[in-house]
Image (cartoon, rainbow, N blue to C red):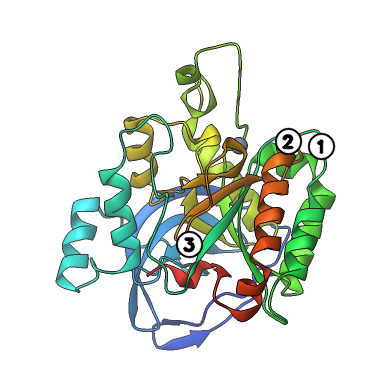
Amino acid sequence: MKAFRLGVVAVLGVLFSLPLSAGVFPRDYHPILGWVSVGGQSWLALRAWQASGPHVLAVNPLTAQTQVLALDAPPRQTWSEVLATARQKNLLSGLYFRLRAQALHDANPWDNAGIRQWPSRRRGAWLSFDLCPSSRPLDRWVFRGLLTTQPKNKPLPVFLEVSGRWMSTHTKDLAWLYRREAQKQLDITWVSHGEFHPYNPRVPWRQTFDLTPGLNFEQEVLGPEKRLLAGGQLPSVWYRFPGLISDSAHVHQLISWGLIPLASGAWLNKGDPLKEHDIVLVHGNGNEERGLELLMAWTRRHQAALNSGQWSWLGRNDFR
Ligand SMILES: [Zn+2]
């Protein structure tokens, strides 16, 4: 398994780039908030932890992409202070702050709050695969099938929503995904999808998933991030609410930790049509085969457009 490399960071005028070794579980992992300088640019640090020295996870406000940096946590700021600096530095028009503003604007629905569609640089849609706790194996067949439809030598961009329980019980499937990423077949954006991801079909839906009474929501959100870092992978700024169920308080809490709720414009298994600019939702955990069949049928019907580049499965760089 190939560890991702730390970005080149200018600190005290010294440039350095270090591999983050896989297998080191982050200690004292916690949310923070403060600006750090990365190659002369302002990035926003969102997490700090210890793993053979201090580390932070920071987001580039212009691209919403994250990076792990071997740095001490910056002085803690409030969101008002962060936003005031962003305004001064003309960063509020950056993708991260626009996504955040849209997510705050859309915090209230109980169902599917967050980013459902987004303007894209190319014609296409984003594929997201939920990996909720499951006793069934990963649907490797759908990734293999999609890879055969990709233009040659182009990795398939996918958003993978991982629950901690799935990660801990599907170690071989997880290693298979890490290898596809290392071999540049998949270009994975990792999304936390809850540590325990509780679900009880016998209670009203407003009392289950992340709304389960007594649930430690911070542990839910941070658990998969820590597991990803221990595996040498890079957590993103996205979080997928289990069942797409949330309330305004949880959305605001999530955003205060620097994350953006990844909702969906097309949950295929529920019969939603797949449209341009959608965040497409399917399950890759063996529990929603019909959604995957629909995705593959759609892909076969649009094979010519995929081959010619008239339609693309979109990645992190395609948010406009
Ligand atoms: Zn789920």
Whole-angstrom CA distance, mark 3 to mark 2, is 35 Å
**Going by the image, does 103 lie left or right of 70?**
left
**Going by the image, does 199 lie left or right of 175?**
left
Kindly tell me whether mark 1's CB lies below 8 Å from ligand 1: no
Residue 20 vertical placement versus 12 (above, below) = above
* Residue 49 shows up from this direction: yes
Q: Depth check: give the residue in front, 41 or 113.
A: 113
Q: SS for tag 2?
A: loop
Quarter of the view holding residue 146? bottom right
The location of residue 180, given as percent across then percent down, is 76, 66
Three-letter amino acid code at the position of disc 1: Arg
Three-letter amino acid code at the position of disc 3: Val
Three-letter amino acid code at the position of disc 2: Asn
The location of residue 149, given as percent across then percent down, is 73, 69
Q: Residues within 10 Å of mark 3 (few under 14, many from 20)?
A: many
Please state, as top left, top right, bottom left or bottom right, where the N terminus lies in the image: bottom right
Label 1 close to label 2 by CB (< 8 Å): yes
Task: Tell me the residue that label 1 is attached to.
Answer: 136
Quarter of the view holding residue 13? bottom left
At x 45% / y 87%, what residue is drawn?
14
Dividing the image into four quarters, tell me where ligand 1 lies: top right
Q: Residues within 10 Å of mark 2 (few under 14, many from 20)?
A: many
Quarter of the view holding residue 38? bottom left
Q: Which mark is residue 287?
A: 2
Task: Tell me the residue that label 3 is attached to.
Answer: 56
Q: Does label 1 or label 2 sit earlier along the sequence?
A: 1
Whole-angstrom CA distance, mark 1 to mark 2, is 7 Å
Residue 247 vertical placement versus 194 (above, below) = above
* Residue 67 shows up from this direction: no
